[in-house]
Amino acid sequence: MISLDSYHIMVVSNYFHTIKDFINIIFVCKKYRNIIENFHYNPIPLNTKTIMYFKNIETLHLYDEFDENFGNIVCYFDDQVIDNNYLRQFYQIRVHFPVTYERSLLAKNSRFVFDNIVFSQDDRENNDLRSKQEFNNQLLDNNNVMMIPNDTKHVIKNIGGDCFKECFNVCEIVLPSTLTALNKACFSKCTRLKKINLPPLVTKLPIKGFLNCDSLSSIELPKELSSIGEYCFQYCESLSEIVIPNNVSRLDNNTFGFCSNLSIIKLPSTISYIGYSCFNNCLSLKNFVFSDSVFIDFNVFVGCESLTHVKLPSNLQVLNHLVFKNCISLSKLIIPKSVTLIGNNCFNNCTSLSMINIPINVKQIGESCFKDCLSLSSIIIPEKITNIPANCFSGCVNLVDIHFLGCIKILENSAFENCESLTTFDCLKLIVSMGDVCFTNCELLEHVELHSSITEIPCLCFRGCVKLSSIELPYKVHRIGDLAFKDCVSLKKIEIPQSVTKIENSAFYNCVNLSKVILSPNIRNLELSTFSGCSSLSSIELPSSLDQIGFQCFFRCFSLQSILIPDGVTLLETKCFAQCTSLSEVIMPEHMITFQEHCFENCSSLNQIKIPQNCFPFNENNFDKCCLVVRC
């Protein structure tokens, strides 16, 4: 069994917290019974009772502002009265709790030693202090250099929060070598600050420490530095180079955000975490090399317009949201094999990105991941990916070849919107669900074969597919959404299967070469502008299930020659057949029917029409610029 001698037990007792700990050790054995008497200072806070145990105390240590001081007022003013009957004398009194510089100057007893003086905002602003000798008559000299007091009697170890915030005239700050700590935003918005020395004992830089120090072009970080707070150097627009010391293990959120001139940053291999928006809009940053096993948070390089080369960590598992958004100079990137997820907007608007690999282990790519990657011409999608999320390849105007190694089941909203160069999409016949605007403005897409499980053609799905000449709708489709085939100017025919019960607004608007339409017998309404602008449509058989024809439904169908209105129709909405200039025959049902305004306006070839006597209302403007109207 190993035992401790009295000297070593005295060393251990420095870690005791209460007087009970000392009393207990006394009773362990005889050699420890005088252990308390060996102390010439108090290792724990004392009161009027516990001080009796420390018979040989010479130095009083005050650990907290509320510790018993035995009549030794730490900082007092001239009008304060001292009770000498209560006063107990000590050779020295060491104050460990934070005391402002101003308060430390008020200690008229030379026996006081302050171990934690904080230079605060009040100290800087106090006009009386500026006249004291310790300040050399003023803090700020004629060259706008701020000198922080550095003397042995009043050792400053801490700069208080917001201490020099918005000192707009300060160009240089000289800190005392004794300084160990800086507090939140202590130098923020010193917009003319160009130079500052950080003492070697400083181990942490605070949150917003140098925020908006626009003129700070360089700074040498202490070798023992271990932590840099959030937003510490954000908006330091003149900062061009930074070397991170070896003891720093993480860079927190927005540390260097908007440092527009930062072009060189040297990271130690100890870095394991890069925080949210850490290098956001560092416009001059060109190269960045990660060490292995670094976690990269969201938005890290957003807006780094000059970034051309990045080496990602070899053990990276997640390429997070918005990491490279708006990196317009990034032309290629090798993603490590270990990556399993690529986040939302990860490469959004990387307009120069022409070569990128998606590793085989990737299971998910995020929304808008490659949106507006204007230079991307081909890409391979690994087999573990089963859906293409919203806006994933939207705006990839030069994307010609997309190869799927697996089975894609779902295309979400705008997945391939504005992919102007995409000519084929072989995987489409395997898709069971499509989102709105899925292939809008895919101008070179010629033929579409849909999976039999498709139940709807979503809104704007094929709008602007100007080369699309044929499409076969699956028998399970029950809905064709708004503007689904708008401006498909090469589409010549369409057969609407019996399962379709609803064709929504402007579904075939401006399909100028659409000449043949076979409608489902189960459609009840033709909505607003369904076939408006279909100038080649010469005939169409309306189903008996129809009960109304919507606003401008056949507007400007210049080739339409005749129309039979089914018996079930009770409403013709405004301009439903307006400007059908070739329409010469309209056969109306014999029952009551409601006309809205200008139904057959400018049907200049119309020479025969039978209108039931009980139609309501009847207005002559329904047939403006028509040759003949027969009413019976």
Image (tube, helix red, strand yellow):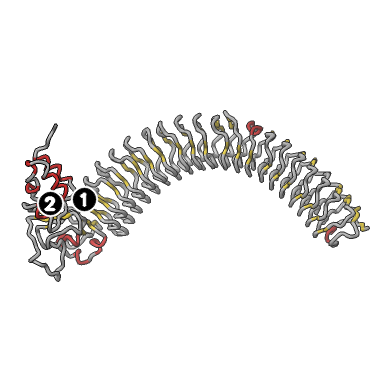
- Near mark 1 (Cα within 10 A), the count class, few <14, some 14-19 or many ≥20, is many
| Residue ID for mark 2 | 42
Counting from the top left corner in percent of width and height, residue 24 is at 14, 46
Give the residue displayed 40% in from the left and 43% down from the top: 284
Q: In this view, does 609 lie to the left or right of 186?
A: right
Q: Residue 179 carries which label?
A: 1
Q: Which of 217 and 84 is in front in this view?
A: 84
Q: Give the amino acid type for the residue marked by disc 1 in the picture.
A: Leu
Q: Residues within 10 Å of mark 2 (few under 14, many from 20)?
A: some
Mark 1 residue element: loop
Q: Nearer the viewer, residue 255 or 84?
A: 84
Residue 428 sits in quarter:
top right
Quarter where residue 431 is shown: top right
Q: What residue type is labelled 2?
A: Asn
Can the viewer see residue 395 in this picture? no
Chain-order first, disc 1 or disc 2: 2
Where residue 166 appears, as percent x and y from the top left, is: 32, 59
In the picture, the quarter occupied by the N terminus is top left
**Quadrant (top left, top right, bottom left, bottom right) of the C terminus:** bottom right
| Left or right: 504, with 181 as reference point | right
What count of labels does the image hold?
2
Q: On the picture, is 84 further left or further right than 332?
A: left
The extreme bottom residue here reads: 79
* x and y, in percent, of residue 511 in the image: 74, 44
Element on which disc 2 rests: loop
Cβ atoms at labels 1 and 2 below 8 Å apart: no
Give coordinates of residue 474: x percent, y percent.
Answer: 72, 36
